[in-house]
Structure formats: structure tokens, C-alpha cells
Amino acid sequence: MNKWLELLIGIILVVIPILAAVFDWFSINLGQATLDFIKGGIVIVVILIGILLVVLGISDIKG
């Protein structure tokens, strides 16, 4: 695919959900659901970073 088309699609896929969360379209209150999702995502990311550091530490010990 064209690199500019990929960039444009990527920007659209990032901007539209942010706008949907910030501006309450259709009165479905996506803002609170988005914040709850991000809070859960932060926990998962911290856990994954911890697992990555443990694996890298074990790799360094073996090497």
C-alpha cells in the first residue's frame, strides 16, 4: 500500500476515536467508557512491561 495512504488511514484511526470520546456524539457518553478502558489498559501495559523486564533479566543471567 502507498505509504501516504497508510499514514492517512493511521491518522484517521487515531483521531476519530479521540473525537468520539471528547465530543459526546449521539448522547451515548463514550468519554466515561473510554476512561475506564484506558485505566484497565494502563494496568495491562504495566504488567507486560514487568514481564518483559523479567524475561530480559533472565536472558542476561543466562548470557
Image: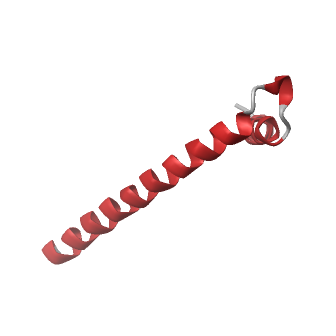
Q: Which image quarter holds the C terminus?
A: bottom left
Q: Residue at x 64, y 46 (%)?
A: 35
Q: Decide if residue 35 is in sight here.
A: yes
User: Is 35 on the left-hand or right-hand side of 13?
Assistant: left
- Expressed as whole percent of the image width and height from the top left, the position of residue 34 reads 65, 41
Above or below: residue 8 compared with residue 53: above
- Expressed as whole percent of the image width and height from the top left, the position of residue 24 reads 83, 34
Above or below: residue 42 compared with residue 24: below
Q: Nearer the viewer, residue 52 or 27?
A: 27
- The answer to which image quadrant residue 27 occupies is top right
Image label count: 0
User: Is 31 on the left-hand or right-hand side of 55?
Assistant: right
Q: Which image quarter holds the N terminus?
A: top right
Q: Residue at x 68, y 41 (%)?
A: 32
- Expressed as whole percent of the image width and height from the top left, the position of residue 8 reads 80, 38
User: Is 58 on the left-hand or right-hand side of 6?
Assistant: left
- Expressed as whole percent of the image width and height from the top left, the position of residue 9 reads 76, 34
Q: Decide if residue 6 is in sight here.
A: no
Q: Residue at x 76, y 39 (%)?
A: 21
Above or below: residue 5 compared with residue 39: above
Q: Nearer the viewer, residue 46 or 37?
A: 37
How is the protein colored in the picture?
A: secondary structure
Q: Nearer the viewer, residue 53 or 35?
A: 35
Instruction: Name the residue furthest top.
Output: 26
- The answer to which image quadrant residue 28 occupies is top right
User: Is 62 on the left-hand or right-hand side of 23?
Assistant: left
